[in-house]
Image (cartoon, helix red, strand yellow):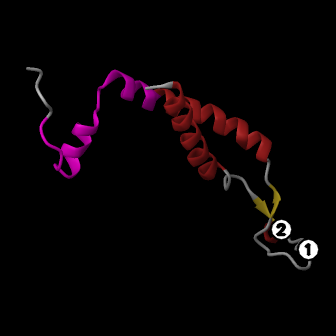
Amino acid sequence: MGITSAIVLYAVIWFMTFLCVIPIRLKTQGDLGEVVPGTHAGSPEIHNLKRKAWITTGVALVIWAIVAGVIVSGLITVRDVDGWMWNRMSPPATGG
């Protein structure tokens, strides 16, 4: 895996993790009973985005290390995934 691939993989994992972490412990205006006129009751009032971004960074780093390790080690290949799901790829070419 190249450096660009590793960075892109981390960015994708980070954003997916962030989207899962955002709603945790979110307090909306409706929850607090103080809805500002002209806004939706589901608008966030207390969101703690900085803390959630740091938590996301740590969790994404662990997930990235596992996924990158599997990719680099060759433990699971694209052919393995194809064989489990669709079985459309031709057999691997033999050297000779």
Q: If you read the primary sequence from the N terminus, does the residue marked by circle 2 or circle 1 appear first? A: 2
* Near-viewer residue (63 or 82): 82
Q: Residues within 10 Å of mark 1 (few under 14, many from 20)?
A: few
Looking at the image, residue 77 sits to the left or right of residue 67; the answer is left
Q: Is residue 42 above or below residue 11?
A: below
Q: Residue at x 51, y 30 (%)?
A: 6
Q: Outermost residue toward the left?
A: 96
Q: Residues within 10 Å of mark 2 (few under 14, many from 20)?
A: some
* Near-viewer residue (64 or 52): 64
Q: Is residue 13 above or below residue 32?
A: above
Most frequent secondary structure within the magenta stretch: helix
Pinpoint residue 23: horizontal percent, then vertical percent.
67, 56
Quickly name the residue at label 1: 36
- Residue 10: name its quadrant: top right
The amino acid pointed to by label 2 is Gln
The amino acid pointed to by label 1 is Val
Q: Is residue 29 above or below residue 3?
A: below
Pinpoint residue 33: horizontal percent, then vertical percent.
86, 71
Q: Is 86 a magenta residue?
A: yes
Q: Is 36 a magenta residue?
A: no
* Near-viewer residue (77 or 38): 77
Image: magenta residue range? 66-91
Q: Which mark is residue 29?
A: 2
- Residue 95: name its quadrant: top left
Q: Are marks 2 and 1 in contact (CB under 8 Å)?
A: yes
Q: Residue at x 90, y 71 (%)?
A: 34
